[in-house]
Image (cartoon, helix red, strand yellow):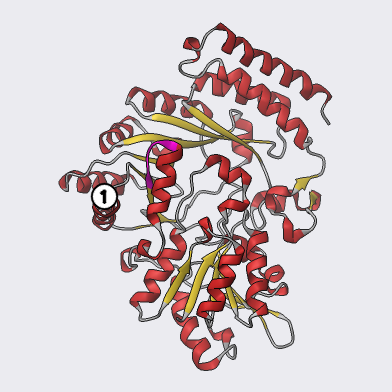
Amino acid sequence: MDILLSHGYFLEADAAERKVMKPYPPLGLLYLAASLERAGFEADVYDSTFGNLQEFCRRLDQGRPPLVGLYGNLITRGRVLQMIRECGRRGIPVVLGGPEPASYAGAYLERGADMVVVGEGETTLLELLPHLREQGKQGLERIAGLVFLDEGGEMVRTPAREFITDLDSLPWPKREAIDLERYLAIWRRHHGKSAVSLITSRGCPYTCTWCSHAVYGYTYRSRSPSNVAEEVDFIRQRYRPDLLWYADDVFALNRRWFFEYAEELERRKIRMPFETISREDRLDEEVIRQLAEMGCWRLWIGAESGSQRILDAMQRRTRAERVIEMVRLLQQHGIQAGLFVMLGYEGEELSDLEETVEFLKRASPDTYLSTVAYPIKDTPYYDLVANRVQEAEPWEESSDRELSVSGRRSAQYYRFVQRWMSGEVASHLPGSRTRGVWQRSKALLNAKLGKLAMKVAP
């Protein structure tokens, strides 16, 4: 074995994730495993989704890998640090990747990591593995896309590595390295239908101030339509899922690519139900009609706010009124519309929240999810409020989701906002009029209680 790849997402340790029960395989790690294997390296994968720390330690003791590669994001910090410590106790060096380590490279290195990969990991690991085998840690400064501590304990950041321009040159994710059937079974048990994820592109060129671009920058690169369609055909025949999840940051961003892809699927006589995320400015009736013909059953739009003033402050480059139009078009073509809404962004006032509630009532999506804005390191939003960010303590046991911004309303206030919002919107969502007088009255009562509580919350 040349490297053991793993990640810090332990489903059993996250009550919120267990409540949702929609786990997806670690595509990034599976891309790395496939790329390394094709180049002649032996890369094992420990998929921690259904595992635990003790099991990870057993893998370390049994396999004694010369190197461990860990993927980290903002919800897995604590577990990744535990895994680093366990590797350290066994004298096994650790290389980290993912958006969270890229933004907190120094903190992770101080806590035992040996190297942090910034950006895409495939080409960096292909250069790093033979270097470590032949020269150890000497000369790491010659490898682009790395952060590490030198012999004097000073942090060294090498030049950025160029992005992979030809995504077709990458092998498909090595899904056989994990127990994918277990993912499918959990989806069927909890949601009635199984799902497999894939990506058609990497990156997002948009400038939303709160969004992290730590791995792919502001690039946008697509696989060829034929390459994606061939993978879909493989997934369909090998795993027979009920649904696909296109995990792109923005699906159908490139209009010409989208219609070429639709033609490729039609040529192969492939029509599979799928769910994905896009933006209102990438949609129109022609695109939505094509989505329906391809099998799209739900499309999520990042609405974020019903206040155009707040959308402009976010540099979202979308229009709230047009989101409403696109929701109606989606529903007219038989596609469920889901919306993401963000509360508490810098400068938001009660009037903006009221606009958002009215926006949701007018849009009447099939479903929506709300979250309270949190400043992610190395984003323009974080920089905007940096002098008022209150760090969560201890850092090792928290994440950027626990960061608070002084001068903003309390977490309790936003819980009441969500109660008010959910009550108001519930009585206007599709089907609400068939739920009975009692259910509608209960929703409206919740709305009133939430609005009253907002007045006394800090």
Secondary structure type for disc 1: helix
Q: Which residues are magenta?
A: 191-195
Left or right placement of residue 366 versus residue 154 in this view: left
Left or right placement of residue 159 versus residue 198 in this view: right
Relative image position of residue 352 (x, y in whole percent): 67, 27
Within the magenta stretch, is there residue 194? yes
Relative image position of residue 139 (x, y in whole percent): 57, 90
The picture quadrant where one finds residue 272 is: top left
Q: Is residue 121 above or below residue 344?
A: below
**Which residue is depicted at the point 57% across and 20% down?**
425
Residue 117 appears in the rendering: no
In the foreground, 398 or 344: 398
Left or right placement of residue 121 versus residue 171 in this view: right
Q: Which residue is mark 1?
A: 236
In the foreground, 401 or 222: 401
- The amino acid type, in three-letter code, at marker 1 is Arg
In the foreground, 59 or 372: 59
Instruction: Report the quarter where the C terminus lies.
Output: top right
Instruction: Report the quarter where the N terminus lies.
Output: bottom left
**Which residue is depicted at the point 53% across and 83% down?**
66
In the foreground, 217 or 154: 154
Within the magenta stretch, is there residue 135? no
Q: Main secondary structure of the magenta part?
A: loop
The picture quadrant where one finds residue 192 is: top left
The residue furthest top is 437
Q: Is residue 99 above or below residue 346?
A: below
Relative image position of residue 379 (x, y in whole percent): 64, 54
